[in-house]
Amino acid sequence: MYTYILSIAAVFLGSLIVYLLKPTNQKNLKLLLAFSGAFLLAITVFNLLPEVFEEHSSSKRTSLWIMVGILAQKILEYFSKGAEHGHIHIHKETTKIPTLLFISLCIHAILEGFPIHHAQGVLIGIIIHKIPVAMILTIFLLKTQIRKSYIVLFLFLFAFMTPLGTFISENFEATQAYYKEITAIVIGIFLHVSTTILFESNEGHKFNITKLLIILAATITAYFI
């Protein structure tokens, strides 16, 4: 039960930080996003990849599903405007929640909830990933003309999508039978999102010692979890 509560709380915490503190320093937010991207990437490499490649006889098929995940995330990004990695394009004059954005984010969130109970550290990785994403999403939504009640409803529903994915993976035989394939798809999604975060947060491809130290800290932390 605590896994459901923590994954929901991550979105609420990110949104609450924006409502209460109203952060304006984009540099700090990008560094937080870089930490989350590096942590998610490290958790994927250290924990999820070894799990799905345990059976060497099916390693190539597993790799195929990982590629499916990468391509699926690329397709989702066309509709989510890059919200999964904090790169959002929403017109300030918008008065309604973008339906395709919401559906894409929900699909992404449901899928990332599948391996939470099966792989160590994934829950922490998702929580660390969701907090800055929720912050950025909230900041962008508040800049639009969308009614505040709709924004709250959007974030509320979004917060419950990852626990929904976890619930489905634990209680439906079909998803349990294809757990390895689904997890491979999730790995592809995580690889795409995390690497995109790291590349996009590197403005002008300049060397940034602070960002490098943050990435190292995230990687070391993930290794020992």
Image: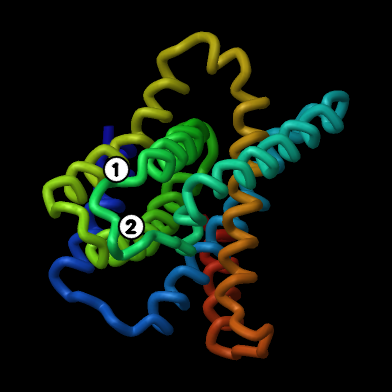
From this view, report whether residue 97 is shown above or below residue 114: below
Residue annotated with mark 2: 134
Residue annotated with mark 1: 159
Do residues under tags 1 and 2 come within 8 Å of each other at their CB atoms?
A: yes
The picture quadrant where one finds residue 136 is bottom left
Query: Dot 2: what SS?
Result: helix
Residue placed at 21% from the left, 50% from the top? 151
Residue placed at 15% from the left, 52% from the top? 147
> Earlier along the polypeptide chain: callout 1 or callout 2?
2
Q: Is residue 116 at least partly visible in the picture? A: no
- Left or right of 5, for residue 223: right
In the rendered image, the residue lying farthest to the top is 173
The picture quadrant where one finds residue 140 is bottom left
Q: Is residue 143 at least partly visible in the picture? A: yes
Could you tell me residue 66's position as x and y percent? 72, 38
Could you tell me residue 74's position as x and y percent? 64, 47
The residues tagged by marks 1 and 2 sit, at their Cα atoms, a distance apart of 9 Å
Could you tell me residue 164's position as x and y percent? 36, 28
Q: Which of 8 and 217 is in front in this view?
A: 8
Tell how many labels: 2
Q: Nearer the viewer, residue 147 or 204?
A: 147
Residue placed at 41% from the left, 45% from the top? 101
Indicate the quadrant containing the N terminus: top left, top right, bottom left or bottom right: top left
- Left or right of 106, for residue 181: right
